[in-house]
Every structure is written in C-alpha cells, then in structure tokens.
Amino acid sequence: MNIFFICALRAEAKPFIEALNLKKLLDQRAFDVYKRNNFFLCISGIGKVKAAAATAYVLTAFSKNAGDILINCGVAGYNTPLISKGETVLINKITDQDTFKEFFPNIIISHSYKEHEIHTFSKAVSLSSPEKKEFVDMESSGVYIAASRFLYLNNIYFLKVALDNLSPEGIKEESILSVMSENVNSILNFAESADLLSQNTSFEFNFSQEDERKLSELFEKMKLTKSMKDKVILLLKKRYVYGKKTLPDMQNIIFPVTNKDERKKEFDKLIEYLS
Amino acid sequence: MTSLSNIYLKKPFSHIYVENQAFKYDETYRITNFFKNSQLIEVSDYRNVFNSHNQNFNLQKKTPDLILAVKKDNFLYKGSDLCHGYENMDFYYLTNMINCLYDCDYCFIRGMYTSANIVYFVNTNDFFDAVAEEALGKDVFIPISYESDLLVMESIFRIFARWYSFCVENSNVNIEVRTKSSCINVIKKYRPVKNILLSWTLSPDLIISSYEKKSPPLQKRIKAVNQALEAGWKVRLSFDPILLIDDAEKIYTSFFNQILSEIPVDFLFDLNIGFFRMPTTYFREFKSKTQFSPVLYSDWEYSGDHVTYSSDRKEKFMKSAEPYLKEFSRLTKVLYMV
C-alpha cells in the first residue's frame, strides 16, 4: 500500500523528507510532493482549504487503493493539562469550528499514543480567544473531508504534536523542526504498523497488475460488452474464493472475434470453461 | 486475515461513542462504567459516526466499537402480514440495538448499514411507551432483535431482562427474541412466560464454521434449545437462511436428521424455513462487502424486490429435503418464509 503524509509547513515535513530520503517530484506543480518507493509527502500550506486541496491532489494522482494510508501530521496548539508539550496525540474526533460538523477517524489500530479530540479553526487561536478549545489546529477537518472520499476511514490518521500553549504568534520554525524531529521515528513506526494492518486486512478483491493486463487483452480479443466482462470477472472471483488462486489460461481456448455471433460463441465457450 | 494483523488490531469496544442526549440516561453511565478503560467520545448525533461513508465494515466486524444513542422516533415498524406465526395479532418489529457480535457472511445488515459498530439505544422506556400505546386494547407480536442478537450480549446490556419485566406486566404484548447464542444461563433465572418466544437460528455445522463466524457450534445451540424447552419456554426453530452452496442437499439432509433425532420437535412452538433472500436495494452493498465469501457466488434470481436463488435450484433442494420437511410438518407447525 502507499503511505501519504500531509504536512502544512516545510518545517513539519523536513524530518520526514530526511528520514525517508524522499525526493521532490519535479513534475508536480500545484503542491510540493516528495516520494520514495511507496512513501509520498505533500506540503499543503496553512489552513483547511489548502489542506483539503493538497490531500485531494496527491490522492488523485497517486492513490489506487482505499487501503492506502494517509497521515496528517504537524504541530497543534493545546490548552489542557492532559497534553504535554512535544507529545504526539492521535486524534479521535475532529470538529470544524466554522461549520460545527464532527468527523470521526475510525481508530481500529492498536497504538500507544494518547487520544484526544481536535478543533479545526480557520484562523490562529490564542489563549485570549473566547472560542478557544483544549486542542486546536487549522488543517484536520479539511484533510478528513478530502481523504474520506478516497480511503477507508480507518486508514486516515491525524497525528498532532503539541507545540504551543495557544500562543501562535511566538512559534518559531526551529521549535517546530525540533518537536517534529523528536517524534518522527515514532510516527514512522506507527505508519509501518498501519501499513501492515491494512495489507493484512484487505477485504477487497483485486487482480494483480499482470492478471489485469491478461484480462484486458482477452476482453479486447473477444470484444466483450460490459455485462459480459462482469460475468467473466464474477466467475474468476468465484474460482479464487473456492481455492483456484491463479488465473486460468484463457487465451488459448478463445479465437479472435469479428462479429456478434462469433463473440456470443466464444463467450459461451469461455463461461462453460470457467464454470 | 493473518494473525499478524491481530497484533495491530485494537480490542473490541475500545471506543465508546456517546450521543450528547444519551448522557441523560442512567443506562449510559452503567454501560460506560462497564467499559471504563475505553475511550469515551462525545457525539452530537450518532448518525455522524454510524452512517459515515467509507467505513471498513469487515474490519469493524473483527473489533467493533459501541455507540450509545437515543432513539428519537420510529420506535415501532409495521411488519409484513405474511408468515410470522401469530396470524391473529398485529405484527411490528423494533430495533433496540443495531448490529451484533457474530459475523455472518449472509447477514442482510451487510447490505443495510455502512458500519459494523454496535448501536444501543439507551432509552428503552421510550420503546415500552410506544409499544404500550400501540398495543392498547389488542394483542401485538413484536420481534425485538431483527437487527441484533440480544442474548449473546445480555450480561452487558441486560435488554432481555428489561423486556421480560415489560412482558410480564403486559400480557397482550408478545415478543420474539431471535438468537444464535448458547447463553442459556442468562435466561435460566426467569420463569417462562407465554408471551415471550425464544427463537433459535440453527444451521449445519459446516455452514456455522464457514459462514457464521464467532457464533456457537450447532451442538451448543441444540443444548440451549433443549434446556429452554425443558424449562417450559415457548421455542421456535429457524432454518433461515438455507444456503444453497455446493453439496447443500447432502449437508442439510444430514442436519435435518440430526435435529429430528436430538430435539423433541413436537414440543416446539413452530419452525421457520427460508432460503437466502435479500432486498434488491441492499444486495449491491452486500456484494461489495462479501467478495471473499462463497455465499455470494450463485445464480441469483431477481424476484420482485428481492434477490434469491433460482426457482430451479430451490426446487431441486426441496425435492431432496421433502421426506424431512414432511416429518417436521407432522411434528410441528412449519412456516415457509418468503
């Protein structure tokens, strides 16, 4: 599975880029996207709208599977004794402070982080703000709304590192870099666990790339309609479920077709072969 | 699913979502206290979490969470007038709880809901009020567990206990409690009453081990049925759904034989038999969640608003099962579910 990181700031992203030796993809213009193997990182910029846009952008371009992992990580402000400075918190509820809509990342993984809810604001919140909350950021709701269109909710994670005691004006880039660097290894270990869990709990039927290529060739040769293709795929899935895990050699029993009658004849032959 | 994944899976009920309004009910505090090590997450409306799209139903089934909610309306649904065994009564059903601990490949809930998390409506008294009002001056029949299995979770939720007390005080309210559980101990302390029907779904062991995951084996269910009969409870058996998998005739005739020899069928209230069927509207979603189960792969026939096996396939089965079905009919009332 692919693993995506969405960070608002370069200082939040840098420890991941270095730890994973990610390389910038020069052909990506809308957002800075980094990649190595199955790891992707996108820097969104500050705010939920940019975060949603970046999430949709990178998932559209690079995610092919609802089992891919997405982790929104970055710093957040806190105003509660339950959370300590520098601590990574796994978010179990997001409230958008503009719409008051609630979102619930579905935590199915076993983990050692503290869990807490977060409130996403459109502007920085300080201790003097009347609407201040215990734990706040500016991206989570945007990332959730976009990512939940693509991925299973249990594969969307929000790991927020407590940084400022609701005094956003005093935040320095070095302090962001420092707290993120302290937490990067733990977050990468978490990402690895999330990936392993997702890989081992796939309930979706997917043909391998090689099998997909073979099927596509066969369908082209037989000029099958959509419903005919669906029937063939259903029978192949049935064979798989009943223990025949490899794709049968169908090319050799099928002749290329040139008209509807030939197609019908070859299709019936194939269905009989697979049944 | 590999054992590796179990290492990374959280424990069941590690998260309890509580609707704001549910905090008005003592039941909420009793349940949250029972799960005091779980994360408590406040929700303004339970549907925000239960109805979210893109939930991984199958993974949630492995380790469900709990949602405590308040049912606001539609406490009772009018049921079909066909085949419920209480022809002289008005038929309703209700859902005090949604989803259950068992993981049955064929369950219609797979097509009905996007979440496998368990919802418990804590305002049970409101259900009682609605039932009492509807039952004023007449007899009613109400299955209370169409969308859950209450008995297997009775030690935690005690829903049966509350309905039992209600039925004792309201003899015109007849309820059916459906179960696959073997938890006979939870009802042993109650005196059988004529307006509570305990209804066990029984299946061949091969079907149970393959398609009714986490549920008790047949022998344990038979034992529970016999104990309930001995205690004097009104008992219904349900062979529903019958799954026409490969060798179904052989598997089910052996099963029917076992039931006839191990359960005093003539002491039953009645027996329900039905082939797998599902509303067409649920079937699409059901298919997407059941891709790895042989249950899905059959020659389905779209019959009215339902999907079921082809008539030919059903007829073939009925022919081979005929001697057994005749014997069941001789011993008790048999209802064929359609």
Image: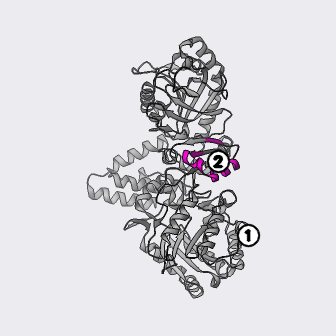
Relative depth, front residue between B288 and A258: B288
Measured in 3D between alpha carbons, the distance from the residue under mark 1 to the one under mark 2, in whole angstroms, is 27 Å
Which of the two discs, 1 and 2, labels the residue nearer the N terminus? 2
- Is B81 drawn above or below residue A266 in the view shown? below
Q: Identify the subunit bearing mark 2.
A: B
Q: Quadrant of residue A14?
A: top right
- Asked if disc 1 and disc 2 are in contact, CB closer than 8 Å, the reply is no
Q: Is residue B28 magenta?
A: yes
Q: Residue B189 shows which numbered tag?
A: 1
SS for callout 1: loop
- Relative image position of residue B200 (x, y in whole percent): 62, 71
SS for callout 2: loop
In this orientation, does residue A152 appear? yes
* Residue occupying image coordinates x 66% and y 51%: B31
Which region of the structure is painted magenta? B17-40
The type of residue carrying mark 1 is Lys
- Relative image position of residue A10 (x, y in whole percent): 52, 16
- Is A89 drawn above or below residue B206 in the view shown? above
For label 2, the residue is: B13
- Is B305 drawn above or below residue B23 in the view shown? below
In this orientation, does residue B106 appear? no
* Residue occupying image coordinates x 56% and y 74%: B174
Quadrant location of the C terminus of chain B? bottom left
